[in-house]
Image: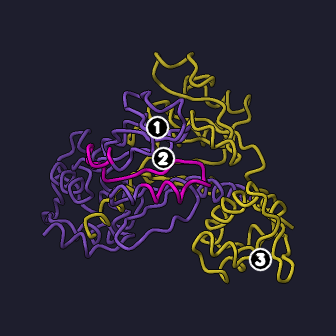
Chain colours: A purple, B yellow
Amino acid sequence: MLDRLRDLIPEPALRRLPWYLAYVSLLREKGVEYVSSTGIARGINVDASQIAKDLSFLDIKGKTRIGYEVTLLEHKLEEFLGFRKGHRAAIIGVGSLGRALMQDSGLTNYGLEIVAGFDVDKEKIGTSTYGMPVYDIADLTAKAREMQLEIGIVTVPVEYAQEAADAIIAAGMKAIWNFTPYRIQTPEGIVITNTSIYAHLAVMYNRMLSH
Amino acid sequence: MLDRLRDLIPEPALRRLPWYLAYVSLLREKGVEYVSSTGIARGINVDASQIAKDLSFLDIKGKTRIGYEVTLLEHKLEEFLGFRKGHRAAIIGVGSLGRALMQDSGLTNYGLEIVAGFDVDKEKIGTSTYGMPVYDIADLTAKAREMQLEIGIVTVPVEYAQEAADAIIAAGMKAIWNFTPYRIQTPEGIVITNTSIYAHLAVMYNRMLSH
């Protein structure tokens, strides 16, 4: 049932669910027991009818005039979003950004378990970063099987992005989280998610000029 | 002229420009002298007519049958995107993610100069992180003036996101880069950019289930 609902949810709604989760977690910490979509709307500045519609994809019912049970809603949101399941990932490219992600323990709260790094640099191979081993990228296929790696996080310099992605695919991993601004080309069946924080910078600078 | 064109560009086009920049920088490093929009299209998997249209917002003309001069295009893109100008920023919340951004020297290449961190934790105040001072959040207004801070990067725990934003606004800074999933409310005239990498995780996990 969960998987069927997941298939139906439009991506913009899916992207909004973590906002609700953040607010609901905050309410739970404050000891609030129930919250309505109107209450969430006031707290995070999103239209209440939109929230109600987005939450309808979850396997949860609110009570009339009382709303949703906060702890249950938090649990259902985390479960629906895949944050309660550990997804095993590796950093490909243990440079500045790669190390940055390896040290962000916050990712674990969202179901991402970074367990190793891979690099081509002989100086880095065999060392450990924030307690995680750094391996030779040439060993990715063997290690991916051994460590049950599902997600490859691409933090190499932009000119090696496609090469890194090809290595991840060859290693049998099913998802690529691309932090480079390069548009990686992937075959059918591979999940690719692009997070270009630098593109966000461009948008921010542009808005700053217009203000 | 640059500012006028900047006002006209639609946000989706603006978000694509860093992709072209990444590819063009790669070509320049390889010693390529000219590139056409068709060439860029082949390299990064985006429609050529879209690229030509997006690049028409830049103050640059390609030559018929030869294309754009690579070094000039790279320069114009960096300039247009604001990556050649230093934007002074501070990390609000020197936790795991805050430290991660402070150590990502790659941001400097995109015009972001993180120069300080601010926190409420007495253990952190007065120390330095990756060579940057960590100050008391209570001193933000004074330090913002002294250090000419423009951008506040919000990496506090989600329940303090609004409070951190309010402090940034009170300090007279003009832009907020929000890394929390909380929908911060800001008055007119403040630029807010939301980068919720955890929402990207939700989308990725969801696609992995459907494959």
**Percent x, y for residue B124?**
49, 19
Mark 1 falls on what kind of element?
helix
Q: Is residue A158 magenta?
A: yes
Mark 3 falls on what kind of element?
loop
Residue type of the residue flagged with mark 1: Leu
Residue type of the residue flagged with mark 2: Phe
**Quadrant showing the N terminus of chain A:** bottom left
Label 1 vs label 3: CA separation? 37 Å
Find out whether the residues at labels 2 and 1 contact each other: C-beta distance under 8 Å.
yes
Mark in front: 3 vs 2:
3
Q: Is residue B166 visible?
A: no
Q: Which mark is residue B56?
A: 3
Q: Which mark is residue B179?
A: 2
Q: Which residues are magenta?
A: A142-167
**Percent x, y for residue B30?**
73, 57
Q: What residue appears at the point 66 percent right and 59 percent down from the top-left corner?
A: B22
Label 2 CA crowd tier, 10 Å (few <14, some 14–19, many 20+): many
Find out whether the residues at labels 1 and 3 contact each other: C-beta distance under 8 Å.
no
Q: Which mark is residue B97?
A: 1
Quarter where residue B171 is shown: top right
Quarter where residue A50 is shown: bottom left
